Image (tube, grey):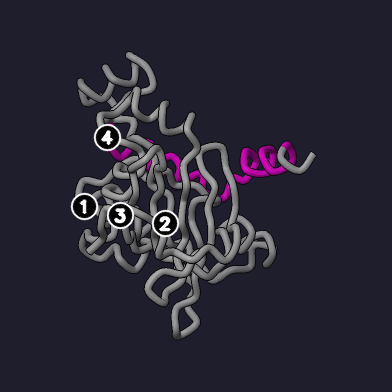
Amino acid sequence: MGIEFTTLGDVRIVGKLGEGGRSTVYHGIWQDREVALKVYKPLAVERHARKHSQNLARYEYLRNRAFYEAHGLSRYVAEPLGYLSTSGIFAFMQEKLDGELYYFYFRSRNGTVPPSLFRHVERMVELCHKVGLYDIDLHPMNVMVVEEPGGEPVPKLFDFNLIPFHVHPPNKLVGLLLKTGLMSLEARDLRKLRNFHNFNRVEAKLLKYYE
């Protein structure tokens, strides 16, 4: 079970895994295992607090745990380990995944990947919806491809800080459509699933980042 930490003093930071608009992610060692430690930026914490009653670190930890503990999903979800929300520091810790982001995995092989890989993505979405988990933030840069002991590549979700659109609709129209049932809770995930291999937006962002 995960815990709420009072300190991260027992986590040894050995490197930096990446940085985004909301957080910086570090490679750490905790209790003899490799972990990914996400430290949130103050602006991201403030924005989340305005939209939701929970702090960002606790929110992502609980949402990650809901996915991880759902029937059949632990195979496709990074294990959440704990969070910190004291002394003005907000951080979330989960297992470190050893693999490639789906986009880079797919591109580096010129698209010649096992058909079973995308079937796993579809299965992952199906399992989420069966237990009432929606708005997965399904994105080729939010899914890690990890090879299982037998060599089979499987997708793993690791990003859970997005507030689902049915909890906090982006506008009144979407809220009305959801309330009246004209838009299903599955709609956004299914649209993203259909467009999963359309990398135009991903590549536009990468181009802007490296300019």
Location of residue 192 with respect to 43 vertically, above or below: below
The span shown in magenta is 184-208
Q: Residue furthest right?
A: 211
User: Can you tell which quarter of the image residue 47 is in?
Assistant: top left
Residue type at the position of mark 4: Gln
Q: CA distance from mark 4 to mark 1?
A: 25 Å
Residue for point 26% across, 17% down: 176
- Residue 14 in view (yes/no): yes
In the picture of the structure, the residue carrying the numbered disc 1 is 130
Q: In which quadrant will I find the N terminus?
A: bottom left
x and y, in percent, of residue 129 in the image: 26, 49
In the picture of the structure, the residue carrying the numbered disc 2 is 157
Q: CA distance from mark 2 to mark 4?
A: 22 Å
Which is more N-terminal, label 4 or label 3?
A: 3
The nearer-to-camera label among 3 and 4 is 3
Residue type at the position of mark 3: Phe
Location of residue 30 with respect to 183 vertically, above or below: below
x and y, in percent, of residue 64 in the image: 32, 52
Secondary element under disc 1, as helix, strand or loop, is helix
Which is more N-terminal, label 3 or label 1?
A: 3
The image's mark for residue 5 is 3
Secondary element under disc 4, as helix, strand or loop, is loop
In the picture of the structure, the residue carrying the numbered disc 4 is 54
Q: Are marks 4 and 1 in contact (CB under 8 Å)?
A: no
Please indicate whether residue 133 sits to the left or right of residue 148 in the image.
left
Residue for point 46% across, 69% down: 29
Q: Is residue 197 magenta?
A: yes
x and y, in percent, of residue 137 in the image: 42, 43
